[in-house]
Amino acid sequence: MSRKPIIAANWKMNVTPSEAVTYLDTFLSTFSQPVNVDIVIGASFVTLPKAAELIGPNPAVDLAAQNMSHEANGAFTGETSAAMLNDVGVDYVILGHSERRSLYGEDDAVINKKVHATLAAGMKPILCIGESLEEREGGQLESVLTSQLEGSLAGISADQMADIVIAYEPVWAIGTGVTASKEQAQETQAFVRSVLEKIFGSDVAGATRIQYGGSVKPGNAEELINQPDIDGFLVGGAALDPNSFAEIVGAGIGG
Ligand code: PEP
């Protein structure tokens, strides 16, 4: 089954609106025509409107938020709703990132509510899952990933899966410079697909795009994207430089 790769930048709490102008001037000039990879820029809430304005006419690049409230509106100080993101022109929402899970206490139950709210608003979740080093070394890799998938995707239909991207991000590889080997990433992503098959059946599992995330850089993107179950990347540090992110996208286009 052929799946169109999707390569997303996760800027995290970096890139001000003014800095986004400089970044996107460079990046968008490289990708001004549609390519055989979906390209996504994940910006902070305050940078989203400026990024949306700059990306607006570009046919190759979409916009992602990095989080969202599952509540529709009301007395939730500091939160941002699906309607707000929609209004700005957001296409994807990164949900359940390990930093949200570990630093802000998000669990699968709340992430599941966010997945439902994102889809209900017509946007596409990029659902992050991944194990810690302790869990991997303790033999819990498969049980952790299975329960993250089952919990975060509870109540999701097979049809809705067409709009969901999974990002497998081993926590020990995020921002550490340590990348999973291509064999480790492939083996784990094949396992993730097998869990999706058990939940949703083989058609859905075969069609779902599974990104790898964790210290992806220009030097390792090509060998990773060539693995059969790696359908793109979620990129943090190496996506802070537009030329380096463009090189990673280039590996996806060539792969
Ligand atoms: C991420 O934050 O999703 C990520 C993968 O970060 P990095 O590429 O810096 O490891």
Image (cartoon, rainbow, N blue to C red):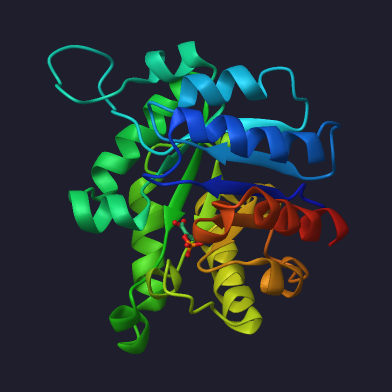
Say above or below: 208 vs 186: above
* Quadrant of the snapshot with the N terminus: bottom right
Q: Residue at x 76, y 32 (%)?
A: 60
Query: Where residue 212 sits in the image (x, y, percent)?
Result: 58, 62
**Front position in the image: 231 or 218:** 218
One can see residue 129 in this view: yes
Q: Which residue is found at the position 37% from the left and 82% from the top?
A: 136
Q: Residue at x 77, y 57 (%)?
A: 252
Front residue of this view, candidates 115 and 221:
221
Query: Residue 85 lies in what quarter of the image?
Result: top left
Against 86, residue 187 (above or below) is below
Q: Left of 16 or right of it: where is 198? A: right
Which residue is depicted at the point 36% across and 36% down?
67
Q: Along the horizontal axis of the image, is 46 left or right of 38?
A: left
Q: Nearer the viewer, residue 75 or 151?
A: 75
Residue 195 % position (x, y): 51, 62
From what the image shows, is residue 44 above or below residue 100? above
Regarding residue 161, the answer to whether it shows in the image is: no
At which x and y percent is residue 184?
57, 81
Q: Quadrant of the C terminus?
A: bottom right
Figure quadrant of residue 56: top right
In x, y percent, where is residue 217? 63, 67
Q: How many marks?
A: 0
Residue 104 lies, with reference to residue 198, above or below; the image says: above
